Image (spheres, rainbow, N blue to C red):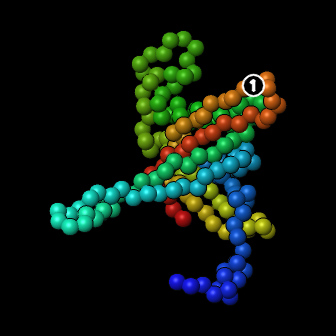
Amino acid sequence: MAFSLDDIRGELRKGVARSSHYELIIGPQSISYRAISLTAPGRSISATPSGVYGAVQEIGYAALYAPVSTTIYCSPDHSERKYFTEWQDEIVGGHRTKRTAANDIDFDAGYYDSYVKDVTIKQYDEKGSKTHEIKLIEAYPRTVGELNYTYQTNELLVFTVSFQYRYFNE
């Protein structure tokens, strides 16, 4: 399909989205001022081969949702990281916070409905008006990344969080 120059100009008049104009909201809490980078959700389709004669065709049957990852600045008291590790404690138990040997009960997993939250990613235009919104349904922090300390540089301390979720809405 050929495109005319007028078609291309018409599409560009709509403008383009900027990767730096976003906000991350977890439940009712915005942490956008601390989230320095963020990936939007991706999706692929599981497929199975079908057919016994001729060219085999792939039949799609389920959606697979790729985790969403964000990099977050750490404050001096690491409160952002504590927020996510405490959220993980709701999932896998509070054994991490025990000052003495943890009991088996400290490893009890939480109920799914008690630890999942919706996570919203909002996109804004140059004037600050919302142009797009993606909502991760039933999300939780699957991975809270390590902290990298070093005397070699004076960089800001950051960590990553990877969210798993059931599906997303756009």
Percent coordinates x, y for residue 2 in the rendering: 56, 85
Residue bearing the label numbered 1? 150
Circle 1 residues within 10 Å: few <14, some 14–19, many ≥20: few
Residue pictured at 17% horizontal, 62% vertical: 52
Name the foreground residue: 117 vs 127. Answer: 127
Tell me where residue 164 appears, x and y as whole percent. 50, 46
Q: Is residue 66 above or below residue 128?
A: above
Q: Is residue 2 above or below residue 19?
A: below
Inspect the image, locate mark 1, and give the three-letter code of the amino acid beneath it: Thr
Residue at the image point whose x is 78% and y is 67% from the top: 126
Instruction: Classify residue 131 by image quadrant.
Output: bottom right
If the image is split into quadrants, where does the C terminus sit?
Answer: bottom right
Q: Residue at x 68, y 49 (%)?
A: 37
As drawn, which residue projects farthest toward the front? Answer: 54
Residue 139 visible in this rendered orientation of the protein: no
Q: Residue 42 at x, y = what percent?
A: 51, 56
Q: Is residue 104 left or right of 22 when viewed as pictured? A: left
> 16 above or below 32?
below
Q: Secondary structure at mark 1?
A: loop
Q: Residue at x 77, y 30 (%)?
A: 76
Q: Horizontal placement of 39 versus 138: left or right?
A: right
Asked whether residue 85 appears in the rendered view, the answer is yes
